[in-house]
């Protein structure tokens, strides 16, 4: 229990860690650096899915458990995408005040973080909990850091104070702790759900990679640099997988 709590807290609060630079930097970030961060995050999540979640789901539940769980993950993210408005943090017009629309944007970001917390919790409930749980928590944490920075940057550009933006960005990641513990408890009580939960997490992550991170990292003419960053992210996560 302590392990999943520590892992989920650290991965979730990485959003706040990523937002720390906003306290000291100017209110700007080049398109290229933003795209590099997104693509690097996509590479990390891709390697975590293919190297850890999917192989473990296959080992513990077989092919059809993988298919059912992965399809469920994609379906849930599809429904979430259809009901929660998509937010392009870089291209949203500036000058927006902290009103109902800003609150909607913050809520949308927080909701999109929920499946990531679930991935961490389910991973800690697997038979290879120490290895897979720690790796997925690390992968999600590494992905959360640039996301937290972009959220805080967006809020600062909407005339929100730096410390307030940092605090709000941290809270959007903290919601992952709830779903992480929920995923851990459910799959711990019903051990037969573990392979489906792992596959569900993989499906959710793959949806986020292909639907959100890759398109957004290729939208400003930085396709080549983003591709390199994506590959580096994959290799970096594989290195961690093999090292630990």
Image (cartoon, helix red, strand yellow):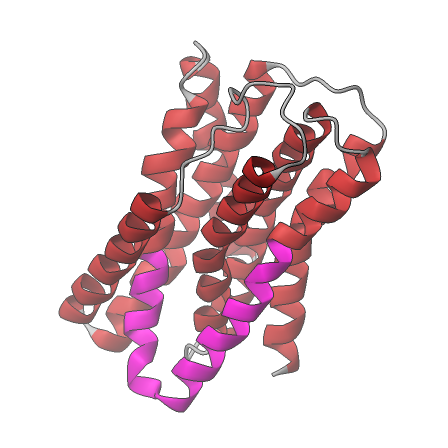
Residue shown at 51%/19% (left/top)? 91
Vertical order, 140 against 29 (above or below): below
Can you give x and y, in whole percent of width and height, for residue 77 in the image? 32, 52
49 horizontally vs 29: left or right: left
Q: In the rendered image, is residue 130 in sight?
A: no
Check if residue 117 falls in the magenta segment. Answer: no
Magenta span covers which residues?
173-202
Image quadrant holding the C terminus, namely bottom right
Residue shown at 19%/71% (left/top)? 65
Can you give x and y, in whole percent of width and height, for residue 172 in the image? 61, 51
128 horizontally vs 159: left or right: left
Of residue 8 and residue 168, the one placed in the foreground of this image is: 168
Can you give x and y, in whole percent of width and height, for residue 13 in the image? 68, 55
Image quadrant holding the N terminus, namely bottom right
199 horizontally vs 140: left or right: left
Q: In the rendered image, is residue 43 in sight?
A: yes
């Amino acid at each position: 229990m302590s392990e999943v709590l520590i892992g989920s807290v650290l991965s979730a609060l990485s959003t706040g860690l990523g937002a720390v630079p906003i306290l000291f930097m100017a209110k700007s970030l080049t398109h290229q650096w933003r795209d590099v961060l997104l693509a690097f995050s996509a590479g990390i999540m891709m390697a975590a899915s293919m190297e850890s979640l999917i192989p473990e789901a296959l080992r513990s539940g077989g092919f059809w458990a993988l298919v059912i769980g992965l399809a469920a993950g994609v379906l849930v993210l599809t429904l979430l995408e259809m009901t929660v408005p998509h937010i392009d943090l870089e291209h949203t017009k500036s000058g927006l005040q902290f009103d109902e629309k800003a609150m909607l944007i913050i809520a949308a970001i927080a909701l999109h973080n929920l499946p990531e917390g679930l991935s961490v919790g389910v991973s800690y409930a697997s038979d290879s909990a120490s290895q897979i749980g720690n790796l997925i928590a690390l992968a999600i944490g590494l992905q959360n850091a640039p996301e937290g920075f972009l959220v805080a940057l967006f809020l600062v550009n909407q005339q929100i104070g730096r410390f307030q933006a940092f605090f709000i960005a941290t809270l959007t990641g903290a919601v992952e702790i709830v779903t992480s513990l929920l995923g851990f408890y459910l799959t711990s009580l019903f051990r037969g759900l573990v392979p489906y939960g792992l596959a569900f997490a993989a499906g959710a992550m793959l949806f986020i990679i292909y639907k959100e991170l890759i398109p957004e990292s290729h939208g400003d003419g930085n396709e080549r640099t983003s591709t390199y960053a994506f590959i580096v992210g994959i290799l970096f996560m594989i290195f961690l997988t093999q090292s630990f």
